[in-house]
Amino acid sequence: MNRFSAVIAGAFAWLAASSQTPANYSSLYTGLPVEVAQVTPVTFPDRSASIISHGATGDAVTLNTAAIQGCIDSLATLGGGTVEIPSGVWLTGPLELRSNICLHLAPTAILYFSPDKSLYDDGPRSRFKPCITARNCTNIGITGRGLIDGNGVQWRPVKRGKVSPTEWSRFKDMGGVERNEGSMWYPWQLRSGYPDLAPTPEKQEGRRNDLFRVFDCSGILLKDVTFQNSPKFHVHPFNSENIIIDGITVRCPWNAQNGDAIDLSDCHRCLITGATVDAGDDGICLKSGSAKKGTEINGVHDVLIQDCVVYAAHGGFVIGSEDICGIERVVCRDCRFSGTETGLRFKSAISRGGVTRDIYITRVMMSDIIHSAVTFECTYNLANANIKPGEVDQSKPYNIPEFTDIHISDIVCRGCKTGVSASGIKGFNCVHDIEISNSTFVYTREATAIDPATTSLNFSDVNFVADRKQ
């Protein structure tokens, strides 16, 4: 052990002996307007090991993938426990969690993912390896007040219209190539010299990975950690259940391409509380794709979102664009959105749709919303599906979106172009039985933009106030 590692090991020796007491979240489920199945505490064996003991060095130079993964694997063979990541900048490649393993980051720890794309190459698959992943695991966690950085600037394309001339020059200084008559920059053939792994920059961009992406897991705890600068999505569980996301921060530039913050895809029994989001795409988002074979967890059920703050994002709270297997029994309350493009966003389309119902949203405070405070859209990205709404053959089994039994109340929004916008699909009952009550929207352009021929919204005690001074 070198002197640097010895100092760190001594300074954080107390972490190795520490045990984490599971929080009891049952009190958060009181006073709900619909019964939502509760999460249960995620616990780990009272056993720990420091990555330093496996040869890791937090000097921002040494590649620690083998050391960190070795610590995870050796602790897993003993039945699990806590992998301690102490103070330092820990350069690493992709990591895979095991059952009953929790990564715990010290407040001054940075887990920094390498810009070397070859580390994430997993053969001829459609996507690169996620920075952190797990499959078919029970009880996995990431806790502590440290920071996890996906080094996404090495992966993400950049739209010229979304950055200043100074920022554009900084990207070009990295190398890369411009496409579409200079309107898009790709991190391709960078001056860093790391190899590219696809025949074109566009194809490499299509394989971008997520920062935290897990599959078919039960019992996930993410607490207090900061996730930032993902190559693509930040926190992205798939077909998993009993998920607790408590007090995390997710951040990336507002213009980060596909920089979703928290996406739950086909997940059951989920709690998101105290999260802070400042991201480049959807803020807190629920999705449901096509049914997956070999899993009982399809669709999104039983979700409580509470006491969260969203700054930059395409939407503060978002459902879609996929909701094929259905989304239901969701409560979102006591949140703040400031500076998002839209506030509450429901989006889907033919071929992406299913039934979204039993959704209750209350006491959401908004300010400086760029477009609509509340919006329903049923023709999202239809151009890519080569389907025109007016040409749908109703005898064929398309996946048609249906938003119904949605209750929005006690919303206050100061500053939006449009208070409420909604449009469905001609010939289909896509948006109906939507209730908006006891709310105030201060708008700059129009109170509502609602298509009465394709939607049915009910307003009760809703105050629309024009602010023409902006």
Image (cartoon, helix red, strand yellow):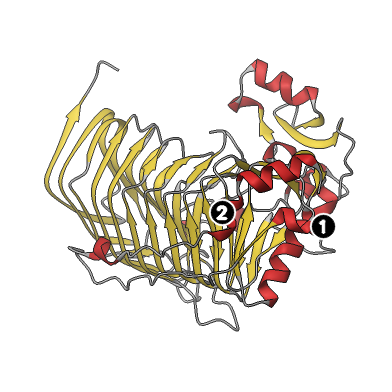
Q: Could you say whether the residue bearing mark 2 is in a helix, strand or loop?
A: helix
Q: Please identify the quarter of the rendering in which residue 195 is found.
A: top right
Residue 459 as seen in the image, left or right of residue 232: left
The kind of residue on which mark 2 rests is Leu
- Circle nearer the N terminus (2, 1): 2
Q: Please identify the quarter of the rendering in which residue 238 is found.
A: bottom right
Vertical relation: 267 (above or below) 466: below
Q: How far across and down, in percent of the image, does residue 29 sit?
A: 25, 65
Mark 2 lies on residue: 15
Label 2 crowd bin: few (<14), some (14–19), many (20+), radius 10 Å? many
Visible in this render: residue 203?
Answer: yes
Q: How far across and down, in percent of the image, does residue 127 sit?
A: 73, 58
The residue shown at (58%, 68%) is 47
The residue shown at (78%, 40%) is 3
Q: How far across and down, in percent of the image, does residue 200 sit?
A: 85, 45
The residue shown at (81%, 49%) is 1
Mark 1 lies on residue: 121
Q: Nearer the viewer, residue 401 or 333?
A: 333
Residue 85 as seen in the image, left or right of residue 155: left
